[in-house]
Amino acid sequence: MRHLRAAAAITLAVSVVAGVTACGGGTSSDGGSNESPKTLTYWASNQGPSIEADKKILTPELKKFEKETGIKVKLEVVPWADLLNRILAATTSGQGPDVLNIGNTWSASLQSTGALLPWDDENFEAIGGRDRFIDSAVASAGKEGEPPAAVPLYSLSYALYYNKKMFADAGITAPPATWDQLVEDGRKLSKDGKWGLGAEGSNLSNNIHQTFVLGQQHGADFFDEQGKADFTSDGAVAAVKQYVDFMAKDRIIAPGNAEYARNQSLTDFAKGRTAMVLWQAAATTFAAQGM
């Protein structure tokens, strides 16, 4: 019986821009250093419940950095929906930030543009050595066999969040430990206009994450023997079907969730309309909504 606990880690990395002209003047167009910059520009990805919440968290840390180094950091928090397009535009135009966050799934393709500083042994040594970081996180930040394009900053994993009161009202004494139990519990909870599990059918990245986790449990390999991407293996198909069936067959997800975008399922959970949700780093969003 497949268990719920095999969640995939999603790594967010921080990269130094080498191949574009950065606003702070900290790097040159050929990747070499100029004079020590007085200001650095930093594009941070939106990790918290809002742009303002991220600014509130990051600003004191950047002030500490300024006090220690004399270098001011100009911060811009960029929504995930805009971040990749902003990075690609900066790469094309030659105008971009000094430092930015990237998702690890973008690492290899952005690395191929030549716009990001390669984190070779010398550059790693300048920040305390590669052994400060978990090997799997470093490996996810670039193409195999080449220096990574970024340094791991945050690593997130998915967890099952559940509403204790809704569980108790349904006579359920503990959270599910297997997918079969999740479906069984979800059916007990899906009544009176409320639903067992939340999902976001219009959130591409979330769907990819969920089916990747299920794919790993089904033994899916997303590459064929020649190393070409292949999403038609038995394991990959079984994973997608299992995820879709939570709504289509098992009926533990509201049909309207098929149109949900980022964080809408979290709102339903925080408001008591959904009993369970699978998410990463969701606690701040719940707290911001009064849960």
Image: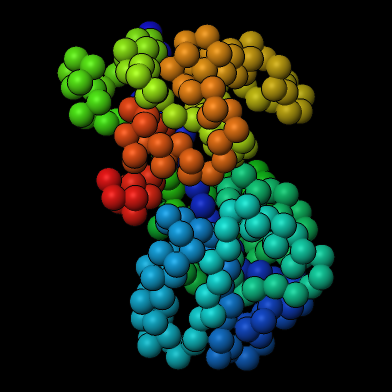
Q: Is residue 216 visible?
A: no
Front-most of residues 98 and 265: 265
Residue drawn at 37 percent across, 68 percent down: 57
Residue 204, quarter of picture:
top right
- Which residue occupies the extreme front position in the image? 192
Residue drawn at 47 percent across, 10 percent down: 250
Residue 148, quarter of picture:
bottom right
Q: Give above or below for 185 relative to 25.
A: above
- Which residue occupies the extreme right position in the image? 92
Q: Give above or below for 279 relative to 240.
A: below
Front-most of residues 53 and 15: 53
> Percent position (x, y) of residue 259?
60, 33
> Percent position (x, y) of residue 151?
52, 59
User: Horizontally, is 275 left or right of 267 in the view?
Assistant: left
Colour scheme of the picture: rainbow
Q: Give above or below for 255 relative to 59.
A: above
User: Horizontally, is 268 left or right of 33 in the view?
Assistant: left
Q: Is residue 144 visible?
A: yes
Q: Give above or below for 99 relative to 106.
A: below
* Number of disc labels: 0
Quarter placement of the N terminus: top left
Residue drawn at 48 percent across, 23 percent down: 254
Residue drawn at 65 percent across, 49 percent down: 106
> Percent position (x, y) of residue 165?
20, 29
> Percent position (x, y) of residue 246?
49, 16
